[in-house]
Image (spheres, helix red, strand yellow):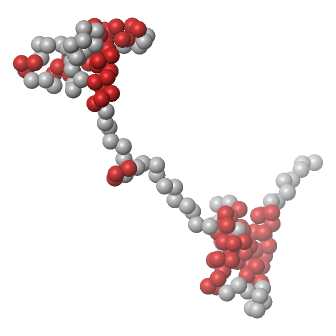
Amino acid sequence: TSRAKKPSHADAQRAVLADVLGPEARAARDAAEGGDDSAQRSWDHLMQQAKPAHLQVPPRQRAHVEFLANPKLYGQDRVRVPRVPVGDLQPRPSVDPAVVRAFVFRLDADQDDLITERDLEALCYRKQLNISQAEIAEMTDEILQRRQACERDRRSLDYAE
């Protein structure tokens, strides 16, 4: 004695549709195995055909009436607006020079408005930043490569760099 699975409501609607409309409904049913939406749409179409002429919804209003009756099924798919800003809304990378000057002034140990590698190492030690001396030297070398050749021997950095 095995228990057979009861047909779903959509399956029952498909069976009635196939019995009423014949072979073309069977072909439509086979083509529409995508889910319950196709069965519901076919059922709505069958109900419109089965109504007397004076009760049928006019074709020019049918799409609107079907949407009001079942908005999730007959509503148009909404296109998700991407969250990527374009044009003037796109943020531009910028740093406030006043903030950089204040950082240099606060960090500079000998008050010459220049930051040395030792100043950065002291900051990393005080604030427990996980930046090694080699990484600080590498960042400083990268900045020095952008300088003119006559300025590359000075390893201290000003706020503009």
> Where is 100 relative to 138, above or below?
below
Instruction: Provide residue 56's location: percent of width, then percent of height.
Output: 73, 86
Residue at coordinates 77% horizontally, 88% vertically from top-left? 55
Residue 117, located in which quarter of the rendered image? Answer: top left
Location of the C terminus by quadrant is top left
Can I make out residue 24 in this image? no
Q: Is residue 26 left or right of residue 149?
A: right
> Where is 82 relative to 127, above or below?
below
Residue at coordinates 63% horizontally, 77% vertically from top-left? 63
Residue at coordinates 21% horizontally, 26% vertically from top-left? 160
Q: Nearer the viewer, residue 69 or 118?
A: 118
Instruction: Provide residue 27's location: percent of width, then percent of height.
Output: 66, 72
Can I make out residue 88 in this image? yes
Residue at coordinates 32% horizontally, 37% vertically from top-left? 93
Residue that extends furthest to the left in the rendered view of this protein: 150
Instruction: Provide residue 79's location: percent of width, then percent of height.
Output: 52, 59
Q: Nearer the viewer, residue 93 or 69?
A: 93
Instruction: Provide residue 92's location: percent of width, then percent of height.
Output: 32, 41
Q: Is residue 122 left or right of residue 62?
A: left
Residue 77, located in which quarter of the rendered image? Answer: bottom right
Residue that extends furthest to the bottom in the rendered view of this protein: 54
Q: Nearer the viewer, residue 34 or 134?
A: 134
